[in-house]
Amino acid sequence: MTESTRLVAGDTAPDFTLLDQNGTEVSLSDHKGGKTVVYFYPAAMTPGCTTQACDFRDNLNSLKAAGYTVLGISKDEPAKLARFAQQEGLDFPLLSDPDLTVHKAYAAYGEKSLYGKTVTGVIRSTVVVDEDGKVALPLYNVKATGHVASLRKKLGLD
C-alpha cells in the first residue's frame, strides 16, 4: 500500500502493536470482537490536538456504552503522551508511532494542504474498525473541533 492509498470501508484494518503513554504494548488485534475508533493526530499538547483529545475524553463514556474503544495515535514518544494524558485527564490509550509506520499503513501521513501550501505531514484521520477487524468508516482530513459530534452522527449514536 502506498502512502496515498486511503483505506475504504471493507478493507482489513492493518494490525499494529505500539506502546501507550504508560509504556504498555497495545495491539489493534487485542480489540477484535469489539468496535475500535483509531484516530491519528499531529502532536500532543498542541491546541487542535488538545481540543480533539478532550472531545474524545468528554464523549468516552457514551462511545464505550455503544461498544467502542478509542485509541489515539501520534508520533509523540510515550513520555510526552503520559504528560498529555495527565494534563488533560485523558483516560484512553494514546499510542506512540515515532517512525510513522502505522500512520502510513492507514494513509494518515502524506501530502496535505496547510494554509494554502502543500506539505507532507500527519493527516488528521479517524478510522472506525468493526468487530471483525474490517474498516467500517474511514474519515480523512477531519477537523479537530466538532469531530466527535460528527463521528457520533455518522455512527448513528445521536
Image: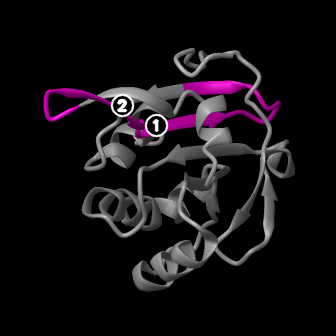
- For the residues labelled 2 and 1, the Cα–Cα distance comes to 6 Å
| CB within 8 Å, label 2 to label 1 | yes
Residue 123 painted magenta: yes
> Is 47 on the left or on the right of 42, as rendered?
left
Residue 22 painted magenta: no
Residue 29 point in image, percent of width and height: 85, 45
Q: Residue 125 carries which label?
A: 1
Residue 134, compared with residue 46, is above or below; it is above
Residue 6 point in image, percent of width and height: 55, 18
Characterize the magenta stretch by its predominant secondary structure.
strand
Residue 151, compared with residue 82, is above or below; it is above
Circle 2 — which element?
A: loop
Q: Which residue is drawn at 59% across and 45% down?
A: 37
Q: Give the range drawn in magenta.
A: 114-137
Specify the quadrant that holds the C terminus: top left
Callout 1 crowding tier (Cα within 10 Å): few <14, some 14–19, many ≥20 = many
Q: Residue at x 63, y 60 (%)?
A: 96
> Which amino acid, mark 2?
Asn
* Marked residue nearer the N-terminal end (2 or 1): 1
Residue 43, compared with residue 120, is above or below; it is below
Picture quadrant of residue 3? top right
Residue hosting label 2: 141
